[in-house]
């Protein structure tokens, strides 16, 4: 079992440049919100939360970033790069993003509009949500 | 009247970097498909088509690009830059994208999945579609 599901996306490269496409065929949810993270200084950690209902995909347009996904018991670290894939993260997982390269552009699509109630921003609350013992 | 409607999007800049967000609040259609254009060599012209039903937004993540929109009678040229806006293009307009800067990353969202039948790829057909005299 892996905490992130990688799906290939289409990339059309020609003398006219590169065109990368995400569509309904390779996306297991309807995109309601889209955001991108850029100009992240060295040493910054982003994420540090989990979602209750929201699905997300992550894809790197430029550079690379490291993402650690945890279910509260174990975690897995992935290096996200510009490799014509999107990485699907289901709800219920804690994520931490770190080691953004200076040129990193990370594009994220979400299945829901913003709702603060969907966030778990505290590690102990996350363990309780996961019905795990506090560590 | 303008051929492109500019809408502001949210950008959150902090010591942790920049986060730009497109969500249902500022998008007049549901995104079904998403693509980005990059590494476009000098002199390349993209677009050169119109859509029958599909709505799109354009937003520049890096660099800049010029877009010319025509209704068959008159046209308007816009410079798209990374300025925290998305530009909405309704169906029924011919578009040509040119003068991509070397670093340009253009993100495009579409209201429909890919369908070749939705494309008008010939200028004369476009004029007929617009019920205009051939020029």
Image: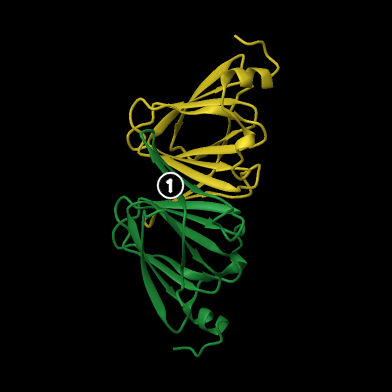
Chain colours: A green, B yellow
Q: Which residue is painted at 49% across and 75% down in the image? A: A122
Q: Is residue B84 above or below residue A1?
A: above
Number of residues whose C-alpha sits closer than 10 Å to that of mark 1, classed few (under 14), some (14–19) or many (20 or more): some
As drawn, B78 above or below A87: above
- In depth, the one of A87 and A12 nearer the eye is A12
Between residue B123 and residue A55, name the one nearer to us: B123
Does residue A118 appear left or right of residue A8 in this picture?
A: right
Point out residue A89 in the picture as x, y percentages from the top left corner: 50, 67
Instruction: Please indicate whether residue B129 sits to the left or right of residue A127 in the image.
Output: right
Find numbered disc 1 in the image and state the secondary structure of the residue it sits on: strand
> Image point 64% across, 35% down: which residue?
B117
| Residue topped by disc 1 | A11
- Chain of the residue where label 1 is placed in the rendered structure: A
Quarter holding the N terminus of chain B is: top right
Q: Which image quarter is the C terminus of chain B in?
A: top right
Extreme residue in the bottom direction: A133
Instruction: Inspect this view and state whether residue B18 appears.
Output: no
Q: Which residue is depicted at the point 58% across and 61% down?
A: A28
Q: Does residue B20 appear to the left or right of A17 in the view shown? A: right
- B28 w.r.t. A38: above or below: above
Residue B103, how many percent across, how many down? 33, 38
């Amino acid at each position: 079992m892996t905490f992130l599901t990688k799906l290939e996306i289409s990339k059309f490269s020609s003398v006219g440049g590169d065109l990368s496409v995400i569509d309904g065929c390779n996306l297991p949810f309807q995109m309601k919100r889209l955001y991108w993270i850029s100009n992240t200084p060295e040493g910054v950690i982003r994420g540090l939360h989990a979602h209750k209902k929201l699905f997300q995909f992550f894809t790197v347009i430029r550079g690379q970033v490291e993402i650690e996904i945890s279910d509260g018991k174990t975690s897995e670290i992935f290096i996200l790069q510009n490799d014509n894939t999107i990485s699907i993260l289901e709800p219920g997982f804690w994520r931490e993003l770190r080691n953004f390269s200076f040129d990193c552009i990370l594009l994220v699509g979400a299945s829901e509009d913003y709702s603060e109630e969907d966030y778990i921003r505290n590690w102990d609350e996350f363990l309780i949500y996961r019905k795990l013992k506090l560590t």
